[in-house]
Amino acid sequence: MSASRTKFYLDKQNRKWLGVCSGIADYTGVDVTWVRVGTVVLTLAGGFPWTLIAYWLVAWMADNKPAGLYESREEQKFWQGVRSNPKRSTAEIRSSFRDIDRRLADIEMHYTSRNSRLANEIDSLR
């Protein structure tokens, strides 16, 4: 079974303690330092027992991040964008495919309009 790129994982490779904060950072795309600072501030600002309980529950329930989940930094950023706003990501992909399709049509038009023999061959295949 392949690993899901839209699932939350504990990031044990970049962990300081159990990998929860680094997992949140990987999932959301926020710098891990800000996640850790936010966790400490939330704990000190009155959430003391509940943040630790939540931290331990997440560490107990979440799976470890599989090695090689992303092939590159760009792929990691893409999947973080998909998790944060899937509709926008889908629209961007559709837009990219429309652009590629338009460019291929332009290339086809360029070559077939200048080369009548090629245009005739393409028409005979239809």
Image: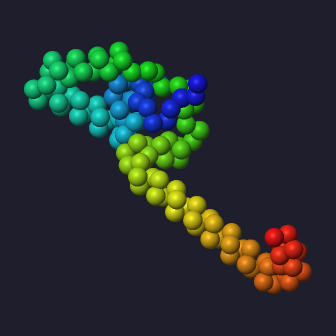
Name the spot of residue 10 as percent of width and height, x first: 41, 24
Question: Is 55 located above or below residue 26 in the figure?
Answer: above
Q: Nearer the viewer, residue 62 or 87?
A: 87
Q: Quadrant of the C terminus?
A: bottom right
Q: Residue at x 24, y 21 (%)?
A: 54
Q: Is residue 12 in sight in this rendering?
A: no
Residue 6, picture quadrant: top left
Q: Nearer the viewer, residue 89 or 21?
A: 89
Q: Which residue is the extreme one toward the left? A: 46
Q: Is residue 58 in sight in this rendering?
A: yes
Q: Residue at x 35, y 32 (%)?
A: 24
Q: Is residue 24 left or right of residue 101?
A: left
Name the spot of residue 19 as percent of width and height, x first: 38, 23
Q: Is residue 103 left or right of residue 92?
A: right
Name the spot of residue 65 as percent of width and height, x first: 48, 26
Q: Residue at x 68, y 69 (%)?
A: 104
Q: Residue at x 17, y 21 (%)?
A: 50
